[in-house]
Amino acid sequence: MNQGGKALSEFVAEATEILDTLNKDLLTLDERRGQEVDPELVNGIFRAAHSLKGLAGLFGQDRIARLAHGMEDLLDRLRLGKLVLDDTALDSLVEALDVLQALLVDASRGETSTAQSARVEALVEGFSRLGAPAAPGEEDPLDRLELDPQVRAVFTEYEEHRLRENVRRGVSLWRVRADFDLSDFDKGLAELNSRLKPVGEIISTLPSAQPSSASGIAFDLIFGSKVTGPELAKAVEGTLAQLAPLALRPPGRGSAPAKARPPAPVAPAALPAPEAPAALARTAASAPAAPSEPRAPSTRRAGSRKGKASRAAPPPEPEPEVEVPPPARAVPSVRAAQGVPETPPPELMAEAGSTGPRVDFDTSLRSLTQTVRVDIRRLDGLMNTVGELLLIKANLQRMVEGARQEGTLVLSKAWVQELGRETRQLERKLDALQSGLLEARMVPVGQVFDKLARLVRRIAREAGKEIDFISSGGEVELDKLIVEELSDPLMHIIRNALDHGVESPQVRVAAGKPRRAIVSLRAEQKGNHVVIEVSDDGSGIDEHRVREVALQKALITEAQAAEMSRRELLNLIFLPGFSTARSVSELSGRGVGLDVVKNNISNLSGLIDVWSERGRGTAFHLTLPLTLAIIRALVVGVSGRTYAVPLNSVLEILAVQPKDIRTVERREVLDLRGQTLPLTRLARMFGLPERPIPRSFVVVVGLAQERMGIAVDELFGQQDIVTKPLGGRLQAVRGISGATDLGNRRTVLVLDVAALMEEGIGPERRWA
Amino acid sequence: MGFKVLIVEDSRTSREFIAAAVEAVPGIEAVTTSSGFEALRLLPRHRFDLIITDINMPDINGLELINFVKKNPNYRDTPLFIITTEGREQDRDRGMALGAAEYLVKPFQPASLEGLVRRYLKLA
């Protein structure tokens, strides 16, 4: 395998995907605490840990492999029913996920921090002691099932366990057979699965070894049905499925008769640890009509696993007349079955030991990868558009050739019309290509929500707060770049909520509130924006205290304070240097205030706003654009200069005469349908010479619930722009977010509407 | 010349790792898939000289695939290797019992897979 950075980045990318899945599934498991555990969910988590272990092993990521191995082992015992999932087990799985994230950060930087190594060891050690052993059954229920041993021989240990569980619960078992065409059997199976899943559990999907026809394939599904036969028949009505019940002998007298079977034949030489399955398959071949089956080997192995606390009492053995080879304890020439994974050979080791800034995982939830997973249909759409563009190019080429041959002078009207048509086509297709590419950059905001949810749980536990975390709208999509940049501000706000907002359970009960607090995270798309709300039902923000602090720190004057509304007072918390925390807490005390959060959001062309009511709670609203890459802008002229205003914040454009503008308290305002609209003159703001013009335009801009008018002299139309950041000293100019090229080699400045509104409306927010 | 090897493994990185190890042998083309279903579809379309499969997969498990291959007269003579991880001895043993020729335990060295491939395809 190539050892360069590419290999490492591939590892990090796939490991990140696996951890995302793990995170989601563990959360689901966590939410359903106390309920019956969904076996499929546990199996999914097991599979993820298993894949991670294999992956980490390939790349020489020992610590990740070791921890994943510990998780896998625990999950294996859980899914095989050897352990019962309790709170301690669940908590340590969640913690292991945290450590895995941190290890992956380490790995991506080629580091090995000793703190994480210690956590790995502690967790792995803890795993081996975890879990309450499940009650052992008396008799292997599988022995009571009339099942072709050949079928049983292809079950994995897990499938066998699920089958056993279903038998134990008295679920009726069926063999569901269906024939499909080879070309689309997966669709057929998916359809059948969707019918079956609501009424039971699909334990195994077996492709039939007998070729039914050249282009066909048959499947046997082993199915545990929660409903009666007729109901099951109804569920699969209209499909090609045929149902056959699997008979079950009554319990208790299973293994006595008909247990005799030929002695176990010699296993193939290549098999280092001969075990029952080999025997099973052959037995079946020689005695196809065996009325009952020998014990499954897995139950024997349950008692033979080495050195684990899970050494649950094995089910009582059947009478010893059955000859079963002793369970394998050691496997020669391959890796030891349990215990520490061996160090991979040196050529498998990824680069290690390089330096780089050490990042505490707690400080950032940003993804480690720069990749975006794109639905293949979106890419197909883009390819189609490119195909159409090529067609247009061919047409244009043909026209150029034609014009060349006919000479330069006579360009017919028809030719010009055709050129116009092609140009319009070109424009449309380019638009489609652009919006397609923008779509491909979009990722669900839920990616961040999931990560936050896990963190919330941990922080709450550490702070002794009891909370329910609710998130919704995770499917809302935003530009990958914005989603990445969102995680830190959101985490900060949530930390604040848990630290300052949510009261301790005792205080809540004393105040007559439910013991458990609710912290919620919601996303919703509103037009060209996404609004994300972080709210809690905690103690709320004391606006009197805010006012006091702001005055103390001279952020506002007494006169200003006297005029401010409640909402204006609350928004003071975003000012630099403001912090109401009387003591620096362990959680939020990082010397970072909400002003940093506000800056982060402003850098994304977004707005942040707060609502709070004492005793009832606090809500932060983040209003963000869907994308930053290409935006549509309104091009305007002021005092002979040209500016671009992002169109997503433009609400309407008014033509006004000088008499429409009034002055209230030394500020210019405009009456708009009965409401007073504050007005800003760009010329004044940027120190340009003002020219008296009889008629000007007012561009009404708005973000969240704020509105403001920007007076401009001329309107030039709309255009798509790509904003480039300004370098050097220009960066600090308020009201300008960057520059853009308008295509005719003219570079214009792009207005930062959020900053302009702050300037125009003032830090004390007169417009409320 | 020209051998075709089918690789069935749901982890993308592992799949590429295995494919790279196999294709290190000149004259071998690796056909890869992440799912057992897709493998069932690929089997009749190609003539494979070797099949390498993972056991733990989402749709049909590797054992079911081995059973399918080994019971089908069209494919049963094709040698088949299983890729397993530690701790899954029962599943591995079942795979061997169903007729797998060799097994490899992750993490393994590319050279050991390459050696097995050469041996089974009777290449120097």
Image (tube, grey):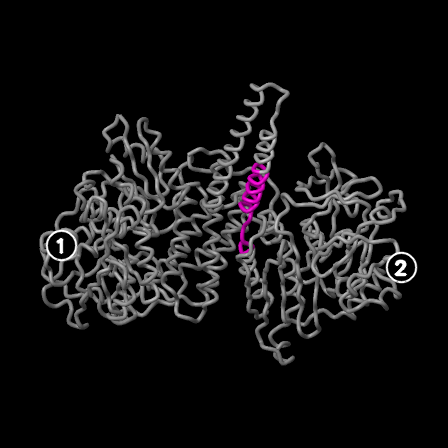
Q: Nearer the viewer, residue A251 or A586?
A: A251
Residue under the point 29% across and 60% down = A203
Q: Which residue is disc 2 drawn over?
A: A663
Residue A424 position (above or below residue A761): above
Q: Residues within 10 Å of mark 2 (few under 14, many from 20)?
A: few
| SS under mark 1 | helix
Q: Which residue is disc 1 drawn over?
A: A284
Q: How many marks?
A: 2
The mark found on residue A250 in the picture is none
Instruction: Name the main secondary structure of what is drawn in magenta.
Output: helix
Give the mark toward the camera: 1 or 2.
2
B83 displayed left or right of A379: left
- Give the residue type at disc 2: Thr
- Give the residue type at disc 1: Ala
Residue B88 in sight here: no
Residue at mark 1 shares a chain with residue at mark 2: yes
Q: Position of residue A90 (x, y in %)?
A: 45, 63
Q: Which residues are magenta?
A: A425-447
Residue under the point 73% across and 47% down = A645
Q: Residues within 10 Å of mark 1 (few under 14, many from 20)?
A: some
B112 displayed left or right of A547: left
Q: Quadrant of the N terminus of chain A?
A: top left
Residue A63 position (above or below residue A474): above
Q: Determine the image quadrant of residue A349.
A: top left
Does the magenta portion include A442? yes
**Gap in Å between the C-alphas at discs 1 and 2?**
97 Å
Dot 1 or dot 2, earlier in sequence: 1
Q: Nearer the viewer, residue A239 or A117?
A: A239
Q: Quadrant of the C terminus of chain A?
A: bottom right
Q: Determine the image quadrant of residue A590.
A: bottom right
Q: Position of residue A135 (x, y in %)?
A: 31, 70
Q: Position of residue A509 (x, y in %)?
A: 61, 79
